[in-house]
Amino acid sequence: MKVPFFDLTAQYAEIRAEVLAAVGRVFEAAAFSGGPFVEEFEGAFAGYVGAAHAVGLNSGTSALHLAVHALGVGAGDEVILPAQTFIATAWAAAYVGARPVFVDSDPDTWNIAPSAVARAITPRTRAIIGVHLYGQPCDLDALAAIGREHRVPLVEDAAQAHGARYRDRGVGSVGAVGCFSFYPSKNLGAYGEGGALTTNDPALAGRVRGLRNHGSTVRYQHDEVGFNYRMDGVQAAVLGVKLGHLRRWNARRRAIAGRYRAELRHPKVRLRHEPEWADSVHHLFVVSVEDRDRFRAHLERAGVETALHYPIPCHLQKAFASLGYRKGACPVAETHSERAVSLPLFPEMSEDQVDHVVAAVNGY
């Protein structure tokens, strides 16, 4: 049996009629950039997250950029973030001229370690970015407490965590700002690029709406230097359809992850710790294996496709070589990056496919 890592075609087959009808309405209205379909999705997504406001954008990277920009972070400032994350988290600081300060992961949850954040705070720190890595919430209470003590806002990078909950609150509604990506492979994915920023602060939401539209809220009046970060109507329509299915899809992801956690028993395959307060949506199911290449080759021979997230931590990327980080600066993140393997997990997986992955892993 062949088990793909991910299969978007199966999802499209299920919702094809709904998607085509929704996209058809966009074409009929010629509402291609911003407009009513974006506004409708923004309202629905804010309600889903539990935030007062959602601002549709063209990517999750843009959401992160505008989050720190709107919070007043700039040249000479510092932004604390985990070393083990997708590079876009770090771009948020770099784009505004701030210095990314990379910190280590918790050895059990693999999320940003609050103790490492506390040690990294300086008078120049202007923001903390907590990443809900692989769809599992990070320790928002601990991070928020550090932020309050030092008067530093908390940004949630929820790009992989649509629908995840932290102590029964939707991620993206707890920090000063939440940032979401709708890259096609995400739990809630567009058919192209897309993103959103969520917040409970009406003034911040209003500013971001202007920033995404060339610094303008009134046509041809530009109050500040802005960006072309608008969401398009087609993506908003697709996302609106998919949002109606997201709870069911996330429930299926949790069921598959539950089987993996109960049935993967190989002593060399380490599973992630999930605290009781973190309700993950399992964007990715990642295990840690010391001999990763051999493990992946074994699964490939068994017909199981795997992936790597992320093989080089941010602080060791060439793009940030000028910051002077060396191997050993974030040892937990570095070890995790060398051992992490992502197993197949998507809502349309059959029970037979899950059985096959479990047997292949346990047969390593």
Image (cartoon, helix red, strand yellow):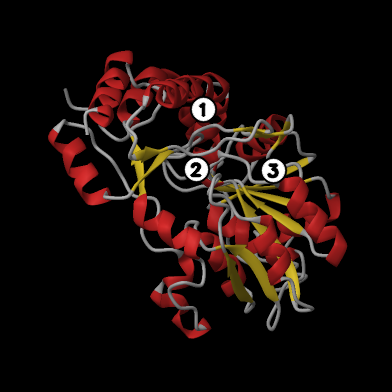
- Residue 255's spot in the image, x, y percent? 47, 19
Q: Disc 3 designates what residue?
A: 172
Q: Is residue 130 above or below residue 43?
A: below
Quadrant of the rendering where the C terminus is positioned: top left
Q: Give amino acid for label 2.
A: Tyr
What distance separates the C-alpha of mark 1 from that of mark 3?
A: 19 Å
* Distance in Å between CA atoms under marks 3 and 2: 15 Å
Q: Mark 3 or mark 2, which is nearer to you?
A: 2
Label 1 sits on residue: 242
Q: Is residue 81 visible?
A: yes
Which secondary structure lies at badge 1? helix
Where's residue 310, x and y in %? 40, 55
Question: Dot 2 lies on which element?
Answer: helix
Q: Which residue is mark 2?
A: 134
Q: Residue at x 46, y 72 (%)?
A: 328
Quadrant of the frame with the N terminus: top left
Instruction: Name the outermost residue toward the front.
Output: 267
Residue beneath the point at 22% across and 50% down: 293
Amino acid type, label 1 = Lys
Q: Position of residue 268 (x, y in %)?
A: 33, 40
Above-or-below relation of 290 to 363 = below
| Residue at (41% x, 58% y) in the render | 335
Where residue 284 sits, quadrant-wise, is: top left
Question: Tag 3's secondary structure?
Answer: loop
Residue 148 image label:
none
